[in-house]
Image (cartoon, grey):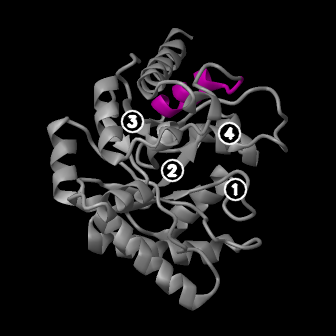
Amino acid sequence: MSDDAFQYCLNTATVRGHELGIVKEVELAAAAGYGGIEPWIESIEQYRQAGGSVDDLRDRIEDLGLAVPGAIGFARWIVDDPAERAEGLEQAKRDMDLVRRIGGTGMAAPPFGAEGKIDPLVITERYRALLDVGDRVGVVPQVEFWGHAETLSRLAEAVMVAVQSGHPKACILADVYHMYKGGSSFIGLKLLGPDTIRVFHMNDYPAEPPRAAISDADRVYPGDGVAPLRWVLSDLHAGGFRGWLSLELFNEGYYQQPASEVAKTGLAKMKAAVQGAVEH
């Protein structure tokens, strides 16, 4: 396995605090050497509201040779209230259509808005409905688990939802930090096939604060924390994953540094983590 065993993507949360706007975020990702970008829907909408052309944005992304394997949105597809869930599916449809229009192929589907603990079998039905919407649009929703959530907090739950959906395009979006925060076993990655994950969020976490108190803002560059990245990357590769490692950080300290430095450092550290997995 070499450092080109995977594809490298920039999730724009990593430079969100710089308030660059989607066009500059795209240009930053390309200049730093990434092959893809994972934008936030909010940023694309702000661009549109300011008079930006979605077609022009797609052309710019294509001209720079970037892929859009995923995007981050917060449609309430999982909630219990039928009317609210129906609106959530409509919002997801609009979001996925926007992603498709800029050349995107995937969309995160986190448990946003879920209250309390929802039966995984019920979630499965709701995820299947979201997948059906994605079929009509041409974008694949990737069921995402959040370690801090009551519902869909672990890798195993997300896998169960994807498997039970019975849909050929069902897949999950996994994340180093969320696996740790929610108590997922990293060994579980050994059990996944090559099509289970299309985008894997890369980050690391420090030994302190402890798991119960750690938050998104504590994420650090891959290799700068205590996550077992060597095993994570080795197991992903052994399972056939050849998708996107997407750098997703929310570190206030990084927001105080030049965006270009953050983007380049993040890519270099992802590649170094992959190389470290190779050497061991």
| Residue depth check, mark 4 versus mark 1: number of the one nearer the observer | 4
Residue 175 picture quarter: top right
According to the picture, the residue beneath numbered tag 2 turns out to be 173
**Can you give x and y, in whole percent of width and height, for residue 79 in the image?**
62, 78
10 Å crowding of disc 4: few (<14), some (14-19), many (20+)? few
Residue at the far top in the pictured view: 279
For the N terminus, give its image quadrant.
Answer: top left
Q: Is residue 196 visible?
A: yes
* Residue tagged 4: 217
Residue 232 lies in magenta, yes or no? Answer: yes
* Mark 4 to mark 1 CA distance (whole Å): 18 Å
Distance from the alpha carbon under mark 4 to that under mark 2 = 20 Å
Q: Check if mark 1's residue and mark 3's residue have beta carbons within 8 Å.
A: no
Q: Which residue is mark 1?
A: 153
Label number found at residue 9: 3
Task: Residue at 44%, 27% (x, y): give it.
Answer: 263
Residue 196 lies within the magenta run: no
